[in-house]
Image: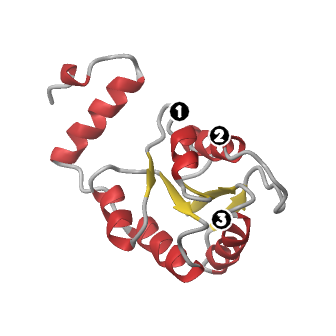
Amino acid sequence: MKIALGADHRGNAAVRTLLAKLAGEGHDVQILGDCGGEVCDYPEPASLVARAVASGQAERGVLICGTGIGMSIAANKVPGVRAAVVHDELTAQLSRSHNDANVLCLSGDLLGVRLIEKIVEVFLRTPFDGGRHARRVKKIEAMEHGREPASVTD
């Protein structure tokens, strides 16, 4: 799978560990907007990763900052991105199966590296369930195009 990674200075160590693990598993993975551990503003890597996912250059994205919240807010500004902040394997699974999330946002401060690796593993292997959830994702897409979600009826 082609995966775009990004981090600010607070997520730098975790994203580098994740890069090595995912590459070792055979994924095509790269860090976008690499700040090399220097202080950087999270909207910059979030924008690069979100745009890569939205354009199809990457199938999924993973962003790590202090809490994951800032990355999620920034990434969700890019149309076509459904970025989810998750804190455990269950919310990672539900973000994919119910919400078809394509960008995972994690906390570098609150989660250990082992848990981050497990969360990413679940996020990458979980398919979207479709069904009633597909209608809801279509409503999100309608909002991205300035339409009311209630306008989606199928």
Q: Amino acid at mark 3?
A: Asp
Query: With respect to residue 69, does 12 lie above or below?
Result: below
Give the mark nearer the N terminus: 3 vs 2: 3
Instruction: Please name which of the two marks, 3 or 1, marks the residue nearer to the observer.
Output: 1
Q: Amino acid at mark 1?
A: Lys
Marks 2 & 1, CB-CB < 8 Å contact = yes
Which residue occupies the foreground of this view, 68 or 140?
A: 68
Q: Is residue 94 left or right of residue 53?
A: left
Residue drawn where x is 43% and y is 52% of the image: 84
Residue, disc 3: 28
Q: Quadrant of the C terminus?
A: top left
Q: Is residue 42 left or right of residue 71?
A: right
Residue drawn where x is 40% and y is 20% of the image: 145
Query: With respect to residue 77, does 61 lie above or below?
Result: below
Q: Position of residue 76 (x, y in %)?
A: 50, 38
Q: Amino acid at mark 2?
A: Ser
Q: Position of residue 95 (x, y in %)?
A: 35, 56
Which residue occupies the foreground of this view, 133 or 12?
A: 12
Residue, disc 1: 77
Find the distance from the CA under tag 3 to the CA under tag 1: 25 Å
Say which element carries label 1: loop
Rendering quarter of residue 48: top right
Q: Is residue 70 left or right of residue 146?
A: right
Give the mark nearer the N terminus: 3 vs 1: 3
Residue, disc 2: 47
Q: Position of residue 33 (x, y in %)?
A: 77, 49
